[in-house]
Amino acid sequence: MVYIIAAGPNIQKGHEMPLTPSTFSIVAADPFEGEIGVAVQSKFLAVGSVVPWARAGVGAIATQSWANTAYGPRGLDLLKQGMSPQEVVDTLTRDDPDGETRQVGIVDAAGDVATFTGSECFEWSGGKTGYNFACQGNILVSGEVLDALGDAFEASIGEELADRLVKALEAAQEAGGDRRGQQSAALLVVKEAGGYGGFNDRYIDLRVDDHPEPIAELRRLLGLHKLYYPREDELVVPLEGEPLERLVADLRKMGYLEDSEETPDLESVQAGLRRFSLTENLEERLRDDDQAYQVLLDFVHSKAEG
């Protein structure tokens, strides 16, 4: 592991600087799955509007501590041009007259990483890198927060990147987190054609802007994302036998099948399931064959049971 620690002087009062999302974050990549992401928590309103930046096939950037949001788009452009994460960090901070007040973490699509903590960031501040990830934080209770952040990410190898990122935030908060408390959190994961309808790369973009327990709320929202958007290798079952019988009963109970249809044909059942799915914004769960996602059938049943 590589540690970069800074406990420099406070910024002089009256010095004109941008907003300072003092926080902890992690940038990471899963090159095998083609996913790149950022997760962040802060005692700062809507931290997701400032810190996380990512582009599929390119990389992810977290900019914080007197954040310079230009680091996001410019850094991604530099990564796309072929610079390494460390070269991007060096370029961004060298060209920034207030570079020593910045904190930034970068990962590229291949999993190469870099982190930077300027000498004028508020203590405790520092960064840590590991396999396919970089984490950084400032105004933390101690360096143990970053240890927990990185250790939790490394311990969850094999799980979906989004889950690993949220687990890392949870562990960091358990270790003390931002010494000022909690307010907001965000999770951004990109992959090619991963967005709604496959039209862009925004696979997961979840934000908790103001909440007493933002990481717990972020975890809840990720659970909803898994309901609305299918994952690869999810359980799919044929619409026949017991699953079909239960679905017919559930749809009829909620008014998505006509009562007169004692034994509706499969086409009618699929039409009813489609109407239900569109009502519940589950259109990404619709299929063109005679099968259904088990998670969708379970959700239909839970709604029917009330």
Image (cartoon, grey):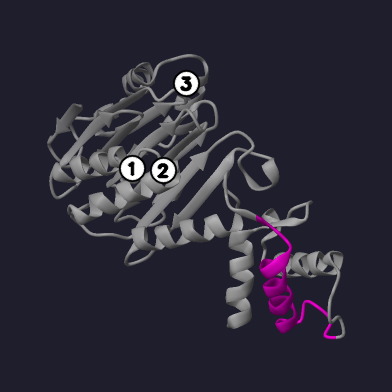
Quarter of the image that includes the C terminus:
bottom right
Residue 206 vs 92, above or below: the answer is below
> Does residue 15 appear anywhere in the picture?
no
What mark, if any, has residue 48 been given in the picture? Answer: none
Q: Which type of secondary structure does the marked residue at label 1 adopt?
A: loop
Q: Which residue is mark 1?
A: 156
Query: Please, is residue 189 above or below residue 112 in the view?
Result: below
Q: Is residue 302 left or right of residue 145?
A: right
Disc 2 marks which residue? 159
Identify which residue is drawn at 78% across, 52% down: 289
- Which of pointers 3 and 2 lies earlier in the amino acid sequence? 3
**What amino acid is labelled 3 in the image?**
Leu
User: What stretch of residues is rendered in magenta?
Assistant: 237-259
Question: Can residue 26 be spotted in the picture?
Answer: yes
Q: Is residue 151 left or right of residue 123?
A: right
Observer-side mark, 3 or 2, equals 2
Is residue 257 a member of the stretch shown in magenta? yes
Secondary structure under badge 3?
A: helix
Structural distance between the alpha carbons of marks 3 and 2: 26 Å
Residue under the point 29% across and 56% down: 43
**Residue 16, image x, y percentages:** 30, 40
Q: Position of residue 228 (x, y in %)?
A: 60, 58
- Give the residue at x 63% y 63%: 296
Q: Amino acid at mark 1?
A: Ser
Q: Residues within 10 Å of mark 3 (few under 14, many from 20)?
A: many
In the picture, the disc for residue 79 is 3
